[in-house]
Image: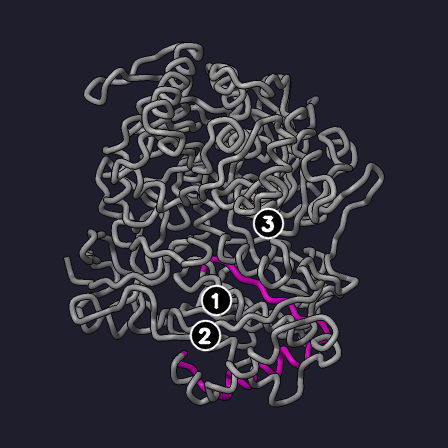
Amino acid sequence: MRYQTFKSTCSYCGVGCGVVVKKDHKGRLQLEGDKDHPVNRGMLCSKGRNLHYVVQDKSDRLLFPEMRGARQHPRQRVSWDAALTRAAAVFQSMIRKYGPDSVGFYVSGQCLTEEYYLVNKLAKGFLGTNNIDTNSRLCMSSAVAAYTKTLGEDAVPISYEDIELADCFLIAGANPAWCHPILFRRLEKHKEENPNVKIVVVDPRKTQTCSIADLHLQILPGTDVVLYNAIARRLLETGQVDVDFIAKHTEGLKNYRMLLAGTSLKKAAKICGIEVNDIKLAAQYIGNAEGFISMWAMGLNQSVIGTDKNFALLNLSLLTGQIGKPGSGPFSLTGQPNAMGGREVGGMASLLAAHRIQSNPEHRREVADFWGVDTLPDKPGLTATKMFEALESGKMKAVWIICTNPLTSLPNSRRIEKALEKARFVIVQDISRRSDTAAYADLLLPAAGWLEKDGTMTNSDRRISYLSKVVDPPGEALPDAEILWRFAQKMGFRGFDYQDASEVYDEHCRLTKNTNIDISGLSHKRLQEEGTFQWPVPFDNHPGTPRLFVDKQFYTISGKAQFNTPVYTENRSEPTDKQHPLVLMTGRIRDQWHTMTRTGKVNRLNSHIPEPYLEINYFDAMERDLKNGDLAVVRNGRGQVRVKVKISTDIKSGVVFLPMHWGKILNRDFARANNLTQGLIDPVSKQPDFKYSAVQVERY
Ligand code: SF4
């Protein structure tokens, strides 16, 4: 049989595995891992292996624009022209009556870079608002804040190829065995082939990742800062630090040292709920390492002290001089496939293109000049949770939601429901009817999905890849970028007369010129012909940059990396009490992705864990007379969830876990974990805390 062959990148997690898609003469698809891809070398996890089924199943797809004249009316099919004319009329009217900050966009780390670029240009350059934020706020913003302050730039220093060069790993607040499976496979193989490699896992739950751990530090939720500070103190005590590196290439050790002196290892162990000797052993592994890599994900980032947790972990790399050399460095594991690409184009309320800062007047001027507009708005934009609070309070009137399902994924779902009910106008642009948020749309726009459009993404190790268009979108669905540029044209804005996504990409690349993330040497054509590149790629023949800071010149003003001093104070998240004595953490399971609008369609993925559950410690279950499989109600003042219990000794007593994926089932929200989560955010990164909500559990 003859096939056409295309290359793409998996559209789920931030590992960014390469895939090869074959299309036969009837349009049927086959898919396999790309053996030549430097990240996955042909491997794919269960989600990636089933991607083509999601593309071929059109049962839930949105096929044409739908609109309603008033909330009480049903939506009806309309033409694209009518849909975008209405969208433009509503946005113009809101902006005229209430000002540009009365509108906003909430987008996604699954958008392609070109889409992200356009929505930013549209909002910040032309509508005059910084109200454009993304579900990446829920994912990486604490890591971004800490990288920026520590290294002078939101820049992951290392590559996947460093994994095989390291001999010690600290995996903190992450379960890559389930959430970044191909990265984990590489780690597992490396450990198998090199048994002396040491792996330390820090997690209140004993997850699948612990199967390869030499040491599992099962800390109490929220105590990470104390642990990493204690490890640092021990490294200093034993002299296992890189004195030369610290002296030449860092600043801030004095204050950091004073901070560390304030907490003994004994006290730290007590706060964390672990043994002193385990802290010493972790420090010994790190201190003895030739190459030390820290890896982390949402356990650190999704916290009211997420930035401090990141600071504390990054300090370990500085203290040991384990950065800017092979097999070493901090490595944040991006949750979404293009969270990094989104940040490159300034896809958050606090950023501008090419990592420029929204609050910096010079940066605003550079971008305004490039876009040919007088000025960019100086007022900070609303971040994810704040945007929905503003809708609820009436400060914001209209929201345009692209490729994300906030009703299921944002914390405190009831509040999100109220916000969407209160909003004057809601546009939802998505591929699927399965998104619970779609029910609130006054205007529902059908978007093209993966393989139905082309563009680029950037994965966890700064690797930019080109995603081919393989099939046409169904019905009248359009690529997100085209929807945005057509809307801009309806608004009468100049500078949106693109013919295709490559023109958008070229413009974005030009705007990065002479920045730390310069990719002016890239184009769609080059990515198609030569494969993936890690930024920066500042000129045409540049090969890309696998490792940053090899010259030990950091992007700070002084050129030196900064020790920060993350102070631990008693829990700053929601306190537990007699009524709500348990700490709820939410997270992912192996075979589902976010709110299941795609993975939930694939039977073989649903068969892994077919229904939601509550993981609860054996003793907490006994106290409540709960047996495995019993139905329990988890509740607090915000809402409740009713699911079967899974009794486990793998979770600490006092802590319970719910998967975050399930939204409404048969129009009922009894399994939605975010009924219970709170809207507290980190004061620096504005990232919400999904890892510490006070709840009670009772037999149902
Ligand atoms: Fe896709 Fe992530 Fe699985 Fe790779 S590890 S196949 S990127 S979901």
Residue 678 location, x and y as percent? 29, 55
Name the quadrant containing residue 450. top right
Do the residues under discs 2 and 1 have CB atoms within 8 angstroms? yes
The label shown at residue 308 is: 1
The label shown at residue 15 is: 3
Instruction: Report the amino acid beneath label 2.
Output: Val
Residue 390 location, x and y as percent? 31, 40
Q: Residues within 10 Å of mark 1 (few under 14, many from 20)?
A: many
- The structure residue drawn at horizontal position 26% and vertical position 63%, both measured from the top left corner, is 694
| Nearer mark to the viewer, of 3 and 1 | 1
Give the labeled residue for mark 2: 567
Instruction: Report the amino acid beneath label 1.
Output: Asp
Rounded to the nearest angstrom, the CA distance separating label 3 from label 1 is 25 Å
Q: Which residues are magenta?
A: 272-298
Instruction: Report the amino acid beneath label 3.
Output: Val
- Say whether residue 531 is visible: yes
The label shown at residue 330 is: none
* Residue 296 is inside the magenta segment: yes
Rounded to the nearest angstrom, the CA distance separating label 2 from label 3 is 32 Å
Q: Earlier in the sequence, mark 3 or mark 1?
A: 3
